[in-house]
């Protein structure tokens, strides 16, 4: 049975730092706590030119989901209809823009603070230079609008697309390592409204609540229905607040739930409705090869039976060597960076490859959960 696919240590609004020394006396951690096939190596990403620095925002340090994959046979994708000309035109504005690299993250802090570290050049060029998602994992209703706005306005100022991750659903992680979130669904709905108020009017991608659907088996039928209703409401709130927002729903990953089962839950959560959804996301903080995720996501979209405009985004941050055959999920050895983040994948119905999990943020084995661990980042990047 698959349990939580993510571990997050929720953080506050201020940036802090913890440090630990590895055996060579170098600072190896920075920041506050916040499979099944023989893989082929993904191409290593080429770093883009760094984004210009923006004003420091009070948003939280990106959190660090922890995957626990379950073995599943590989599946073939079924044919999917091609988007209409109108649908292609609707997407072009987002696809033509570049992703936003938020100037405050644990890896950027490490790079600034460790200029003399022999791992500096590799980590800076191959991880810190890439755009990554910004997580909002702490339930702070009074500040959430301003913190989200700081990220989205930074992206708009540079004509780039930020990726934001609301992660505060009640009973998050089914009481596991990432437990937390809002105290109840009424409070969560109010927090979502305040989150939506910070989305601005420019292009933005919303990765809505990793694990909230794929892991829903831990809930009773009534609890599951109530959560799904809140998630559908969240998608509508985001798109009403900012019609340019692109909202993606949790599809787990290719080694978890069968496509039909996942699609049934996704439909209940509003993912098949254009009023609340632009599609699905998969592989967040996981390691499954991009080819496996493409096939799985297309099957889920087919089973979802929504508008042809629905697409999928895939977290490629750590899947360059595929998932380990033994199913290890906690900072497994031998993993590599995956494909560079992009909004132009060249694959039908695959809208983007994103770095939702920031490479180098530990699952809890190579460092404290949610902290940036330079030795882990260096192993992924070299």
Image (cartoon, rainbow, N blue to C red):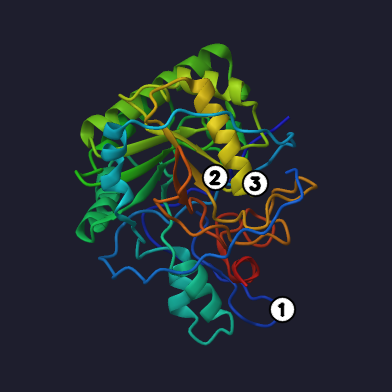
Q: Which mark is residue 23?
A: 1
- Where does residue 236 sit, x and y in percent of width and height? 30, 26
Q: Marks 2/1: CA distance?
A: 31 Å
- Most distant residue in the bottom direction: 116
Q: Marks 3/1: CA distance?
A: 31 Å
Image point (46%, 39%), residue name: 348
Earlier residue among tags 3 and 1 = 1
Mark 3 packing: few (<14 Cα in 10 Å), some, or many (20+)? many
Mark 3 vs 2: CB contact within 8 A: no
Above or below, 314 relative to 239: below
Above or below, 27 relative to 39: below
Q: Name the residue under label 2.
A: 284
Residue at disc 1, secondary structure: loop
- Where does residue 331 sit, x and y in percent of width and height? 68, 56
Residue 298: which quarter of the image? top right
Nearest to the observer: residue 150 or residue 44: 44
Q: Which of marks 2 and 1 is in front?
A: 2
Above or below, 226 relative to 81: above
Horizontal arrangement in the rendering, residue 31 relative to residue 258 (left or right): left
Q: Quadrant of the N terminus?
A: top right
- Most distant residue in the right direction: 326
Q: Mark 3 points at which residue?
A: 288
Horizontal arrangement in the rendering, residue 64 relative to residue 321 (left or right): left
């Amino acid at each position: 049975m698959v349990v939580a696919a993510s571990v997050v240590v929720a953080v506050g609004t201020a940036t802090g730092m913890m440090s630990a020394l590895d055996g060579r006396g170098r600072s190896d951690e920075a920041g506050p706590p916040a499979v099944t096939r023989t893989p082929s190596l993904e191409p290593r990403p080429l770093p883009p030119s760094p984004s210009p620095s923006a004003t420091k925002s009070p948003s939280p340090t990106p959190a660090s989901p922890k995957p626990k994959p379950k073995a599943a046979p590989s599946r073939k994708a079924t044919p999917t209809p091609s988007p209409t000309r109108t649908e292609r035109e609707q997407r072009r504005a987002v696809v033509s823009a570049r992703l936003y690299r938020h100037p405050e993250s644990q890896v950027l802090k490490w790079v600034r603070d460790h200029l003399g570290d022999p791992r500096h050049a590799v980590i800076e060029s191959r991880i810190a230079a890439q755009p990554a998602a910004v997580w909002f994992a702490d339930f702070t209703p009074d500040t959430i609008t301003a913190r989200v706005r700081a990220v989205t306005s930074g992206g708009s100022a540079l004509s780039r697309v930020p990726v934001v991750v609301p992660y505060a659903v009640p009973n998050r992680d089914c009481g596991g390592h990432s437990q937390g979130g809002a105290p109840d669904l009424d409070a969560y709905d109010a927090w979502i409204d305040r989150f939506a108020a910070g989305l601005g009017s420019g292009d933005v991608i919303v990765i809505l609540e990793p694990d909230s659907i794929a892991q829903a088996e831990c809930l009773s039928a009534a609890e599951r229905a109530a959560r799904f209703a809140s998630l559908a409401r969240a998608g509508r709130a985001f798109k009403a607040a900012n019609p340019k927002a692109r909202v993606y729903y949790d599809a787990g990953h290719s080694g978890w739930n069968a496509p039909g089962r996942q699609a049934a839950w996704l439909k209940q959560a509003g993912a098949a409705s254009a009023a609340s959804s632009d599609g699905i996301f998969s592989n967040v903080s996981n390691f499954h090869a991009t080819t496996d995720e493409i096939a799985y996501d297309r099957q889920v979209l087919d089973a979802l039976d929504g508008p042809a405009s629905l697409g999928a985004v895939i977290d490629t941050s750590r899947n360059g060597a595929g998932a380990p055959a033994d199913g290890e999920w906690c900072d497994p050895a031998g993993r590599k960076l995956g494909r560079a983040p992009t909004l132009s994948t060249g694959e039908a119905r695959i809208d983007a490859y994103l770095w939702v999990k920031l490479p180098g943020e530990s699952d809890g084995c190579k460092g404290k959960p949610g902290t940036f661990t330079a030795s882990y980042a260096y192993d992924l990047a070299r």
